[in-house]
Amino acid sequence: MFIRGKPIRFGYKLWCLCSSTGYPYKFDVYCGKSLDGNTDDALGTRVVEQLMSCVNDTSAHEVFFDNFFTSYDLMLRLQENKTRATGTARDNRLLKCPLPESNSFKKTKRGTYEYYSDGNILSVKWNDNKPVTVVTNYDKIDPVVYVERRSVAERNKIHVQQPNLIQSYNKFMGGVDLMDRFVAQYRPSIRSKKWTGLFLKGFGVAHSSQVVQ
């Protein structure tokens, strides 16, 4: 596939479910718009549900994903399946959530946050270097912690408040990137534009699981 603006624009796209330490539990090759399942669902929703299908007891785990996948509908469905989930979200996927727009919110003081909960899903918008919105179906704002940041204006380090669910997201997110780093360290010096490249990628993922173990 081709993705404009990426350092490597052409290649295969793999969906991966990994632990926070980079251990791969399951991966799937993206082959275009799927004809399986309910195609009325968003692609991100279908991918998350398909990857989580390998987990026997979802209530014993927490899953984190970025704003490509996050939607209110997905969070609600995962909650119904007793799957605890947290993810960053795009403003246009929050339905009618009454949180301020990012353009106006970025003018607030660093560390400012606002939240909204309908009793099932909690949405929090927090202003760091720029506004970020995090949605969860189980986590909470408290306890609010203080994190260290570099202030250009004050030319010094400052402490800003950070809701608990954002701290959890930062702590456990990034397992797929970690796996990619392991794969890159042991990538064979073979270049191919055919199926062999995909095979070698799969082999690299399998090998990385042994490195993590």
Image (tube, grey):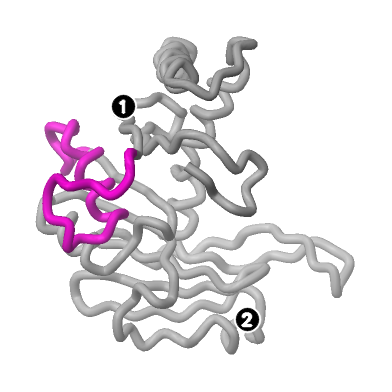
Q: Where is residue 191 in the image (x, y as percent from the top left)?
A: 60, 17
Residue extending furthest right?
155
Measure the C-alpha gap from mark 2 to mark 1: 37 Å
For this rendering, which residue is in front, 74 or 21? 74
Residue 44 in magenta?
yes
* Quarter of image, res 38: bottom left
Residue 12 in magenta?
no
Residue, disc 2: 106
**Are there few (<14), some (14-19), or many (20+) residues within 10 Å of tag 1?**
some
Image quarter hosting the C terminus: top left
Q: Which residue is drawn at 53% across and 61% down?
A: 145
- Residue 84 is left or right of residue 181, and the answer is left
Decide: is 126 above or below 81: below
Q: What stretch is highlighted in magenta?
A: 31-60
Which amino acid type corresponds to the residue marked 1 in the rendered image? Tyr
Mark number displayed over residue 131:
none
For the residue labelled by badge 2, is the local secondary structure a helix, a strand or a loop? loop
* Quarter of image, res 109: bottom right
- Residue 69 is left or right of residue 137, and the answer is right
Residue, disc 1: 25
Give the number of marks.
2
